[in-house]
């Protein structure tokens, strides 16, 4: 029963992370970029508000993926002795993608997001950084999405073992 709950949490966090990223980055943002074409990017732009919600959501999803994956491996360690050859090779590749997604989401959430969230403290300096920081956040969110998708596909491939 515990394994079913852990697998459910693992799959739901993957679905939320991938789904929210695809929805925001490829459906909402291009549409709103057309509407805001002439306006400067600032703290009131839709791009900022969407990325301000998306980045922590993806971080929590990746954190849940890592936590549930580690818990599942620790719970079922004795059952993994008789696995087919190549399982640990694929698991190692998957873990590289997971680590990359984790550190990308940590950097985006805790380093890039605060650069423009404290606009009231130093408005003259931060206003110049809003556009480039939002572009960097968008690019890193796309890279994070790609790494999560690769990790998910590696996990699906591991299910055959």
Image (spheres, rainbow, N blue to C red):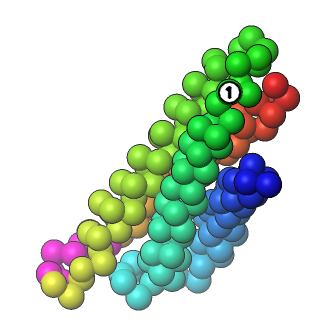
Q: Is residue 75 above or below residue 47?
A: above
Characterize the magenta stretch by its predominant secondary structure: helix
Is 148 included in the stretch rendered in magenta?
no
**Which residue position holds label 1?**
78
Which image quarter holds the C terminus?
A: top right
| Depth order, front residue of 55/155 | 155
> What element does badge 1 sit on?
helix
Q: How many marks?
A: 1
Q: Specify the farthest residue to the top.
A: 85
Horizontal side of residue 130 vs 137, given as left or right: left
Point out the stretch of residues depicted in magenta: 122-130
Q: Residue at x 39, y 55 (%)?
A: 106
Q: Is residue 126 above or below residue 88?
A: below
Is 125 included in the stretch rendered in magenta?
yes
Occupied quadrant, residue 71: top right
**x, y (%) of residue 91?**
63, 27
**x, y (%) of residue 65?**
60, 51
Crowding near pointer 1: few (<14 within 10 Å), some, many (20+)? few
Determine if residue 134 is in view: yes
Q: Residue at x 85, y 29 (%)?
A: 160
Which image quarter holds the N terminus?
A: bottom right
Occupied quadrant, residue 34: bottom right
Q: Is residue 37 above or below residue 148?
A: below
Occupied quadrant, residue 12: bottom right
Q: Residue at x 65, y 74 (%)?
A: 28
| Depth order, front residue of 5/37 | 5
**x, y (%) of residue 118?**
24, 80
Horizontal side of residue 23 vs 45, given as left or right: right
Q: Specify the farthest residue to the right.
A: 160
């Amino acid at each position: 029963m515990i394994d079913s709950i852990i697998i459910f949490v693992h799959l739901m966090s993957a679905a939320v992370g991938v789904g929210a990223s695809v929805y925001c980055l490829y459906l909402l943002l291009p549409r709103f970029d057309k509407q805001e074409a002439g306006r400067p990017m600032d703290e009131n732009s839709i791009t900022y508000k969407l990325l301000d919600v998306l980045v922590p959501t993806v971080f929590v999803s990746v954190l849940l993926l890592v936590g549930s994956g580690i818990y599942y491996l620790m719970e079922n360690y004795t059952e993994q002795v008789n696995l087919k050859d190549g399982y640990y090779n694929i698991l190692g590749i998957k873990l590289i993608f997971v680590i990359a997604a984790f550190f990308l989401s940590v950097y985006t959430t805790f380093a890039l997001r605060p650069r423009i969230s404290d606009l009231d403290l130093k408005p003259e300096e931060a206003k110049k950084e809003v556009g480039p920081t939002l572009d960097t956040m968008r690019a890193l969110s796309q890279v994070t999405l790609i790494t999560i998708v690769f990790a998910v596909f590696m996990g699906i491939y591991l299910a055959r073992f």
